[in-house]
Amino acid sequence: MGARKHNRAEAIKEARKSVAIAHLNNVPTSPYKMRLVADMIRGMKIELALHALQYSSKEASNKLYKLLRSAIANWEAKNEGKRVEDSNLYVKEIWVDEGRTLKRIHTAPHGRAMHIRKRSNHVTIIVDSRIASVETELENK
């Protein structure tokens, strides 16, 4: 590995120390419905995102609420000694990928068949501190 490549790899590894990631796989809702809720909290502060998810009427918000709590717990495990309230955490990235689709056949009139697609999705959320991200950007310049 060359020096430039090695330095870049070390910088990425150092940047990931302050970032917490949580995954949720094979959620039995359609990706479209989950993306509606994910778009709602993207870029929000953690406290506001938790409140928005807690009081949302969408079913997908319950699953994202638990996932966000998991990401916060992962951040706390990485950053022992730091308080969540003081660190100015926010939802840095969140994305919803399409998962497995279960295909079923439903009978229809006149001897026909209708296809039923039961979709699922995978959700990934990244939580970061605004203070740490500003410091790393200044170091890279």
Image (cartoon, helix red, strand yellow):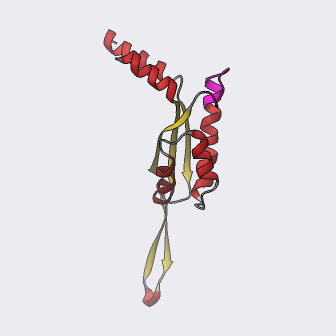
* Magenta highlight: main SS: loop
Query: Which residue is drawn at the image coordinates 59% and 51% (left, top)?
Result: 52
Can you tell which quarter of the image residue 111 is in?
Answer: bottom left
Question: Where are the magenta residues, as a range?
Answer: 75-86
Q: Is residue 47 left or right of residue 36?
A: right
User: What is the tally of numbered marks visible in this picture?
Assistant: 0
Q: In which quadrant of the rendered image does the N terminus lie?
A: top left
Tell me where residue 34 appears, x and y as whole percent. 51, 55
Q: In which quadrant of the rendered image does the C terminus lie?
A: top left
Tell me where residue 120 appears, x and y as whole percent. 51, 56
Tell me where residue 9 appears, x and y as whole percent. 40, 18
> Residue 6 magenta-drawn?
no
> Residue 78 magenta-drawn?
yes
Can you tell which quarter of the image residue 22 is in?
Answer: top right
Tell me where residue 113 appears, x and y as whole percent. 44, 79
Residue furthest to the bottom in view is: 110
Q: Confirm whether residue 115 shows in the render.
A: yes
Q: Confirm whether residue 16 shows in the render.
A: no
Query: Which residue is drawn at the image coordinates 55% and 39% (left, top)?
Result: 45
Query: Which residue is drawn at the image coordinates 68% and 20% (left, top)?
Result: 81
Location of residue 80 with respect to 69 vertically, above or below:
above
Query: Which residue is drawn at the image coordinates 55% and 47% (left, top)?
Result: 25
